[in-house]
Image (tube, grey):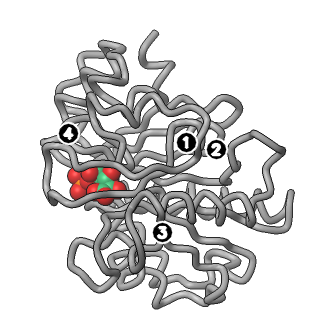
Amino acid sequence: MPDTTYPHEVLDDDAALATRAFEVLTEAAREAIAARGKFSLALTGGSGPRGLYQRLAKEPGSVDWANTFVFLGDERFVPYDAKDSNFGMCKTLLLDHVPVPAENVLPIPTDTGTKEEAAVDYAATLTRVLTPAAGQPPVLDLVLLGMGDDGHCASLFPGKPTLEISDVWTTGSTPGTLPPPVGRVTVTFPVLNAARNVLFLVPGQSKAKAVRDIFEGNPPKEVHPSAAVQPTDGTLLWLLDKPAASLLTR
Ligand code: 6PG
């Protein structure tokens, strides 16, 4: 039963994972643009998406960037040019190399106020661009996620009150136990679970235990937040490399 709850593919290595992620992303972009004329994409930080971003940068014609709107699923509350900035990484590896209109690039603000103010600001941006029905979460076409060794995704960390938020689309978040120890801003579960497609990119041996616990143990979200990403009407796919899948028993 858990395997059907967490659809996944095991790729040989990081390069194969990036290639498969590239196929999934470019197909999601084509479908969204054919159906609705635009593609809304939430990028993630971490190490998992780096190969994907580099591949997209090498093949800028693979996505209709003119009709793509780029968001971030979470951000460390540091300046964009700081080494820990998720947007900084996405910009350097991807966005600087593709013809996405500047006005379609919508990072989480980190330059004014507090992380709580930035969260309110970003919820307004998501709502303005994606125009959800009143009281409903914005629907992104594709959300990319990594998973921390502790089972967190976006900046939804184990045991934190942010896991329980159901009526607000973004929130400030205190750091978890993993580095870097900086405040965050993150979308909440309602946004992740309203998405049309969610794609986890999870390479590396350090993820193997959490992957097994999630796929085979159905842990509560307080223990492994990533377990609770179950899009209501959308598709979910986990891409693992062999080391990340190495503790799976079925
Ligand atoms: C961040 C991320 C976070 C990340 C995981 C996995 O701000 O760090 O958005 O959710 O995806 O921590 O990161 P790694 O792939 O580097 O382990």
Q: Amino acid at mark 1?
A: Leu
**How far separated are the C-alphas under marks 1 and 2?**
6 Å
The answer to whether any part of residue 13 appears in the image is no
Q: Position of residue 139 (x, y in %)?
A: 70, 48
Estimate how packed mark 2 is, as few (under 14), some (14 to 19) or many (20 or more) residues with alpha carbons within 10 Å.
many
Judged from the image, the secondary structure of the residue bearing numbered disc 1 is helix
Give the residue at mark 2: 195
Give the residue at mark 1: 192
Label placed on residue 108: 3
Q: Position of residue 72 (x, y in %)?
A: 49, 64
Mark 1 or 4, closer to the camera: 1
The answer to whether any part of residue 51 appears in the image is yes
Label placed on residue 207: 4
Q: Is residue 37 above or below residue 159?
A: below
- Ligand 1 image position (quadrant): bottom left
**How far separated are the C-alphas under marks 4 and 3?**
27 Å
Looking at the image, is mark 1 or mark 4 earlier in the sequence? 1
Q: Amino acid at mark 3?
A: Ile
Q: Quadrant of the C terminus?
A: top left
The reply to whether the C-beta atoms of the residues labelled 1 and 2 are less than 8 Å apart is yes
Between 7 and 92, which is closer to the camera in this rendering? 92
